[in-house]
Amino acid sequence: MEYKDIPTQADVERIAGFRQPGCVSVYLPTGTTPAEADRARIELKNHLASAQRALEKLEVPRSRMQSIQAEGERILDDRDFWRYQSRSLAVFLDGELAETFRLPNRLTTACEIADRFYVKPLLRALTFPQTALILALAGNSVRLLRITPDQSPERIDVPGMPTDAASAVGLPSISGRQADGRIQGSEGHKVRMLEYVQAIERALHPLLANSTEPLILAAAEPLLGIFKGAGEHPHLVSEVIGGNPEDKTDEELAAAARGVLDRLYASKVAALRETYEARIAAGTALVDLSDIARAATFGAVESLVIDIDRRVPGTVDDETGAITFGDDDTPGEYGVVDEILRRALASKAKVYALRAEDVPGGGAAAAAVRFPV
């Protein structure tokens, strides 16, 4: 059994691509305390029992039902797994696939059984992952931290990272006149600080080159300006944690960084709404669910915004994209919005999972399209 904490885009696309009878998808809120984990384990046990009854009604082959039950029991009996939880848990079982994700976002409980997995709630972790790197940069020290929603900040050991400005340039101090007199005073100090920053960037490059996490800088001038001007940092957040980071503990830096992330995400949502409103007015974005389903079926969706909490029962025709709306209690129905996002993902559309108040047009979804259909 493979336990993953944060799904990647490839994970979501892979799970969304499964299509066979007996796909069980369970989401439930969890927590980091033993009592919360116990409650979540009991809730999962109840969901799995309910899933077995639904699978029987759908006449899923008994061998597949037995495999699903065995995989579910394996999760329930794994004590080490339940010791380490996050805010929510996603479980996917179909007799062949057995996969879990411990998610940083608080999700509502759900148990869906259909011929495909229910992936919509999984998108929230991709839209707002709530993780970031903090570079705490001062003349006498440098720290790299990683923050996640529920854990204490983690210090990352970076090979080759200088410990301070003086050691980075091979001097006992970067203040005062050098013996050769060539670099001195405030100008010499800036030159040495630049060398220090360049040494930090060389050490960080292997890690940052493969990271998509936001990078939040905690620094004061002149190091702040020197770092920003020294190179390209595609994931550097514009807002910084000001002041001397040596005056802040790891926990204080993490708290400040979470506030930066909240404002960053809020600004992204506002920009997304503004873009969509302009495209809706121009006729290159859709808000009617029937139109969106048709566009997704023919690969026309460029980006998609969905309401993470709203479920629209029903099915979408494989050939035409026509929607047949259903009842909440119809067994085997996978949900219209979930199928739309599945088709959008298949055509490499960017999908954003937002709360109802942030969805442009006020409906269950909105889509920007590549071409009219």
Image: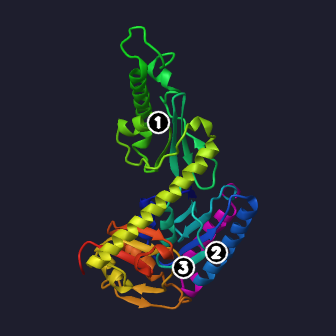
Q: Secondary structure at mark 1?
A: loop
Identity of the residue furthest to the top in this view: 179
- The relative height of residue 304 versus residue 165 in the rendered view (above or below) is below
- The relative height of residue 14 versus residue 241 in the rendered view (above or below) is below
Image quadrant assignment for residue 371: bottom left
Could you tell me which residue is drawn at 38 percent across and 84 percent down? 289
- The relative height of residue 295 versus residue 160 in the rendered view (above or below) is below
Could you tell me which residue is drawn at 59 percent across and 56 percent down? 149
Q: Residue 70: within the magenta?
A: yes
Badge 2 vs badge 1, beta-carbon distance below 8 Å = no
- Give the amino acid at mark 1: Glu
Q: Which segment is the magenta one?
A: 55-81
- Give the amino acid at mark 3: Ile
Residue carrying label 3? 113
In the picture, the disc for residue 366 is none
Quadrant of the image for the C terminus?
bottom left
- The relative height of residue 60 versus residue 168 in the rendered view (above or below) is below
Residue carrying label 2? 48
- Give the amino acid at mark 2: Leu
